[in-house]
Amino acid sequence: MTFTRYALYFAPPTGADWTKFGASWLGWDMETGTQVAHPLLDDLPVAEITDTPRKYGLHGTMKPPFRLAKGQTVEDLKQGCSDLAARTAPVHLQGLELAQLGKFLALRPIGEIALLSDLAAECVRALDRFRAPAPQAELEKRRAKGLSPAQEANLVQWGYPYVMENFKFHITLTGRLEKSLLPHVLTTLDTYLTPVLPIPFEVNDLALMGEDAEGRFHLIQRYPLTGSS
């Protein structure tokens, strides 16, 4: 399969209950590259609620989507991911919890997240040589939303505003929700998803992802974190 963009994700572990629920909830299994039937939960319009995050799959972004730089190949990128993972230690956190982030819902890590943020920053830095400069139209689209000076500096240097000190790890579960619907969705996810969330939460590998022509992301390869620091 030919991909238009690539990204480095945290991808939930294969076969875990929360992974299976999340794929069904979003309607897209990025590991198998297949659509999944949405669950029937309390008459919620799940397909509508999850329309925005569906194409990305259940994930936490470590290096945001990018086009491959001229002169770089997919095999070069794979080797770069392998080298990064070989010198990087796994990250262990207390767990994951359901959270409201503005008008959408996501999973957020519990407890101290400094090591996770450091890992994401290293992913951005270490793989940046593979990233083609973002098109001007894309930069202007991001600027139109309003950026702080630090976010603008990140956009210029790394092609994305919400990295480095502006990075906040999260696993998106919904698009923007109407105020009247949000409590119902939150309660439903708390009932069905919270009991199967991991405690502790461990990041043991990184997942190289590819975006297909329809904008859906597929798992290309996992890279176990085998470093000691």
Image (cartoon, rainbow, N blue to C red):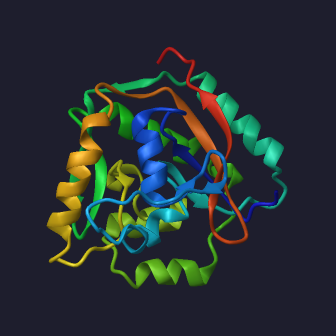
115, 9: nearer the viewer: 9
Q: State the count of labels.
A: 0
Q: Kindly indicate the quadrant of the structure image that contains residue 93.
A: top left
Using the rendered image of the protein, determine whether residue 113 is visible from the camera's viewpoint.
no
Q: In this picture, is 211 found above or below 49? A: above
User: At 45% from the left edge and 77% from the top edge, which residue is drawn?
Assistant: 142
**In the image, 4: left or right of 45?**
right
Q: In this picture, is 181 found above or below 23? A: below
**In the image, 6: left or right of 107?**
right
Q: In this picture, is 228 found above or below 90? A: above
Measuring from the top left, give residue 112's x and y in whole percent. Answer: 23, 32
- State the residue lying farthest toward the top: 228
**In the image, 67: left or right of 28?**
right
109, 156: nearer the viewer: 109
Measuring from the top left, give residue 164's x and y in whole percent. Answer: 40, 50
Measuring from the top left, give residue 156's x and y in whole percent. Answer: 51, 67
User: At 62% from the left edge and 64% from the top edge, which residue is drawn?
Assistant: 216
162, 106: nearer the viewer: 106
Q: Kindly indicate the quadrant of the structure image that contains residue 42.
A: bottom left
**In the image, 21: left or right of 99?**
right
User: At 31% from the left edge and 59% from the top edge, which residue is drawn?
Assistant: 41
Q: In this picture, is 174 found above or below 177? A: above
Using the rendered image of the protein, determine whether residue 149 is visible from the camera's viewpoint.
yes
* Quadrant occupied by the N terminus: bottom right
User: At 37% from the left edge and 35% from the top edge, which residue is drawn?
Assistant: 116
Measuring from the top left, give residue 224's x and y in whole percent. Answer: 59, 25
